[in-house]
Image (tube, grey):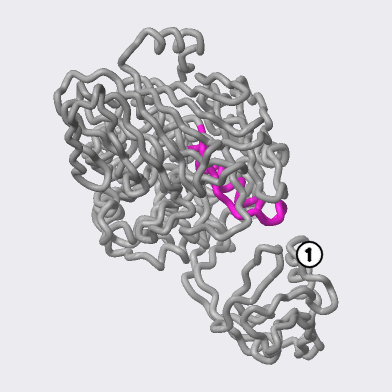
């Protein structure tokens, strides 16, 4: 990947050019959750111009209409010349004559703390304006552009609180005591480089020549950038093997924000960019959230492969206000999600059983979506509500599509080719600046591989036949059991979550089994001990495992809970009952066949590299 322009070169260029957007943003004099922004525009050739804020941005697959968060939009004229400003829609303003424009000013409300409740912006794609503490700046949520003039340079000047630092993957910026200047080559690059402004907590690593930045904002300092670097270094080492020995990027930034409050969207996660990814995750015990961080970071980093190096015209020529979507979310999100877990198994970060359990989880989750809807049709129409409701299936069924395609390629090639190699070959064929034709991708891949792959695409992506999971897993010597009834020990079947104090809280009782019903649990009970052992994030897994191994039917067992009584006071209560095996249904179980054929062993060995002993049984 080419590096960005060196700072002295870019600055000398921008000083000489009048065709540049010059933005000024005040991070000091902030009114609640609102920023003041001022723009000195570039030179115009047209009499009438249209200034827009984005409707859609890459990676979000939803029309957020960021113009909704703009107020007090004003066009300041030169020499009091009359100017006509016509608001065309939520995002765009038509202005004439352009020659009379001296400045544009407006205010921006953040999306994390807005009163606008419809189409809530997913936090990693939004903005947070928290005066004196932290500013999460996704540039598309703050800065606009003139239609037809988005390829010009942008200069963003920030007046900032003392000692604040802009964490970003951008290389072209200057830092001052009170003012920073960030330079971008064009609007697409501006959108592609988010910034988190705060007192810095950063750690840098060099991995095979790539400079990796970890930036952390943790509301109560529970998590640090040093910790993030430590747990993600093995993931990045695994990535070097995945990409053939080197990371395909010179510089990358992981920008983490850990919040101690519920998000407005009710979700957490991340948004990918070409050289960075921005994360909004709950600030809970680091050991409890470690695997989630690894999974999400692996997913976002793998977007370097697709869509950065493998993408269609719709992404290459992205239109922020007249957006056309690609058919291939199965590729951009599905194969990425699959490989995020697969490479961890491949490199021994997780066990084969943990990987299989993750795939079983996705099988269960996929059943909550409409399996009769064509995946390609959903993808190309994802901005429409009727299709968008199935969007999250790209992380469930999309990953299973990746798994099945991987197994098919391994089978057809007798273990010599797989999905990973296919994607690397596609990235060599196309790359960062050469898009593939959206309607031709399936034919292109079929010619690169096997006729059976073309049939796979037609049946399971273009049409909507259910994925033949049982058949594909059987090829690898694994039995897929959709449903079976068994009798075993349980912990009661209540729904349990972790609250903001890292305590286990009962949130639902609708799934209580016969064992659980004898204790008299109530919603909002906090479980602090199980059978006289403190039940915490650190001990829960061990306690549950010991219980299953040693408990006998008829033994007395106890849950100790904290419960709010009728007077509003908290009290500790001991709930007792007897150990009892219960009959329950297990869904989507995958287990190895007792007698595998040599071909099944070959496919399993090739697929799950840490599964050699199982394949030899």
Is residue 481 shown left or right of residue 245?
Answer: left
Q: Which residue is label 1 attached to?
A: 539
Is residue 179 shown left or right of residue 90?
Answer: right
Front residue of 106 and 436: 106
The spot of residue 296 in percent (x, y) is 55, 47
Quarter of the image for residue 253 reads top right
Q: Is residue 606 visible?
A: no
Q: Is residue 434 above or below residue 387?
A: above
Region rendered in magenta:
276-302
Front residue of 568 and 272: 568
Quarter of the image for residue 423 reads top left
- How packed is label 1: few (under 14 Cα within 10 Å), some, or many (20 or more)? few
The spot of residue 286 in percent (x, y) is 71, 51
Which residue is painted at 40% across and 68% down in the image? Answer: 368
Is residue 550 shown left or right of residue 490?
Answer: right
Q: Is residue 207 above or below residue 144?
A: above
Which residue is painted at 34% across and 26% down in the image? Answer: 430
Asked if the magenta segment contains residue 278, the reply would be yes
Dominant secondary structure of the residues highlighted in magenta in the image: helix
Give the residue at the far left of this rendering.
Answer: 47
The spot of residue 617 in percent (x, y) is 65, 55
């Amino acid at each position: 990947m080419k590096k960005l322009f060196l700072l002295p070169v870019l600055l000398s260029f921008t000083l000489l050019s009048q065709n540049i957007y010059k933005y000024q943003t005040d991070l000091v004099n902030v009114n609640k959750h609102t920023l003041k922004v001022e723009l000195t525009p570039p030179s115009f050739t047209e009499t009438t111009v249209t200034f827009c804020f984005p409707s859609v941005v890459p990676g979000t697959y939803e029309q957020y209409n960021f113009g909704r968060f703009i107020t007090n939009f004003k066009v300041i004229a030169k020499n009091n010349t009359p100017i006509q400003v016509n608001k065309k829609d939520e995002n765009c303003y038509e202005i004439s004559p352009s020659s009379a424009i001296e400045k544009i000013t407006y205010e921006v409300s953040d999306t994390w703390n807005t009163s606008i409740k419809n189409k809530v912006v997913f936090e990693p794609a939004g903005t947070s304006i928290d005066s004196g503490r932290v500013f999460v700046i996704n540039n598309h949520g703050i800065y606009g552009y003139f239609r037809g003039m988005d390829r010009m340079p942008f200069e963003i000047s920030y007046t900032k609180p003392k000692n604040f630092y802009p964490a970003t993957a951008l290389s072209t910026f200057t830092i001052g005591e009170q003012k920073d200047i960030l330079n971008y080559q064009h609007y697409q690059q501006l959108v592609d480089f988010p910034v988190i402004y705060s007192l810095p907590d950063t750690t840098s690593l060099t991995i095979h020549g790539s400079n990796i930045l970890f930036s952390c904002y943790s509301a109560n300092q529970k998590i640090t950038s040093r910790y993030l670097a430590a747990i993600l270094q093995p993931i990045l080492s695994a990535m070097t093997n995945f990409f053939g020995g080197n990371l395909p990027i010179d510089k990358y930034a992981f920008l983490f924000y850990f919040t101690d409050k519920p998000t407005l969207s009710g979700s957490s996660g991340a948004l990918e960019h070409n050289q960075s990814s921005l994360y909004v995750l709950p600030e809970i015990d680091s050991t409890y959230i470690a695997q989630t961080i690894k999974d999400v970071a692996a997913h976002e980093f793998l977007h370097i492969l697709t869509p950065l190096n493998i993408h269609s015209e719709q992404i290459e020529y992205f239109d922020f206000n007249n957006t056309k979507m690609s058919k291939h979310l199965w590729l951009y999100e599905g194969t990425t999600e699959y490989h995020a877990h697969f490479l961890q198994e491949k490199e021994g970060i997780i066990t084969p059983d943990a990987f299989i359990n993750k795939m079983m989880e996705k099988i269960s989750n996929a059943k909550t979506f409409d399996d009769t809807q064509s995946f390609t049709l959903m993808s190309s129409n994802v901005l429409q509500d009727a299709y968008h409701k199935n969007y999250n299936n790209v992380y469930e069924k999309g990953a299973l599509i990746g798994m099945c395609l991987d197994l098919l390629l391994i089978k057809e090639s007798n273990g010599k080719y797989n999905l990973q190699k296919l994607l690397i070959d596609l990235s060599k064929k196309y790359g960062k600046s050469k898009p593939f034709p959206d309607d031709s991708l399936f034919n292109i891949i079929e010619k690169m591989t096997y006729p059976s792959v073309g049939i796979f695409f037609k049946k399971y992506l273009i049409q909507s036949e259910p994925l033949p999971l049982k058949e594909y897993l059987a090829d690898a010597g694994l039995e897929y059991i959709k449903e079976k009834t068994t009798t075993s020990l349980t912990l009661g079947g209540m729904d349990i979550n972790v609250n903001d104090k890292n305590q286990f809280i009962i949130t639902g009782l609708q799934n209580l089994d016969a064992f659980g019903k004898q204790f008299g649990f109530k919603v909002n009970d906090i479980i602090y001990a199980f059978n006289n052992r403190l039940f915490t994030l650190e001990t829960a897994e061990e306690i549950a495992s010991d219980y299953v191994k040693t408990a006998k039917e008829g033994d007395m067992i106890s849950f100790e809970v904290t419960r709010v009584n009728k007077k509003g006071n908290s009290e500790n209560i001991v709930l007792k009952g007897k150990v009892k095996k219960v009959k329950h249904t297990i869904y989507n179980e995958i287990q190895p066949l007792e007698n595998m054929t040599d071909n099944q062993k070959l496919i399993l060995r090739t697929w799950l590299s840490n599964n050699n002993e199982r394949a030899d049984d």
